[in-house]
Amino acid sequence: MCVALVGGMDRLKRDYENAAKRCGVKLKVFTGKESCLVDKMGRVDVAILFTSMISHNARTEVMQKTRSMGVPVTFLHSNGVSSLRQCLSDLIAKREEETCAL
């Protein structure tokens, strides 16, 4: 599963990536300061937005892109590594349930 993380803190970028790697998830981290954020995002299965650490403009761009691609978006207010870990665990569990239901 490939996940885009938008928002968060620059100093935690490596920690976000390591947490996702331990969960078996490929994570693309964008702190929101990148130019052409939407173009760099590429194809992802899920987008996670840290709402406390993202500009309104970046949020709007990401929402337009994900809607056009049919990608689900998860919003988290907390930008900590433990919040990301919990969110990824929930996403993986949900995906496994959907797979078993098929």
Image (spheres, rainbow, N blue to C red):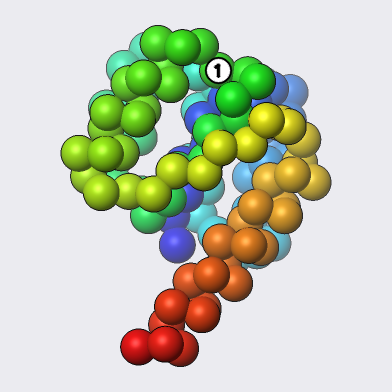
Placement of 65 over or under 26, stated as above or below: above
The furthest residue to the left = 68
Decide if residue 32 is on the left or right side of residue 69: right
* Residue 34 in view in this figure: no
Instruction: Look at the image and tell me in which quarter the N terminus lies.
Output: bottom left
| Residue 79 locus on image (x, y percent) | 71, 31
User: In what element is the residue under mark 1?
Assistant: loop
Q: Residues within 10 Å of mark 1 (few under 14, many from 20)?
A: some
Instruction: Look at the image and tell me in which quarter the C terminus lies.
Output: bottom left
The residue drawn where x is 51% and y is 80% is 97
Quadrant position of residue 101: bottom left
Q: Nearer the viewer, residue 2 or 102?
A: 102
Q: Nearer the viewer, residue 21 or 79?
A: 79
The residue drawn where x is 50% and y is 18% is 32
| Residue 100 locus on image (x, y percent) | 46, 88
Identity, as a three-letter code, of the amino acid under mark 1: Ile
Q: Which residue is mark 1?
A: 54
Placement of 19 over or under 68, stated as above or below: below
| Residue 89 locus on image (x, y percent) | 66, 63
| Residue 98 locus on image (x, y percent) | 44, 78
Decide if residue 93 is on the left or right side of residue 28: right
Decide if residue 93 is on the left or right side of residue 6: right
Number of numbered callouts drawn: 1
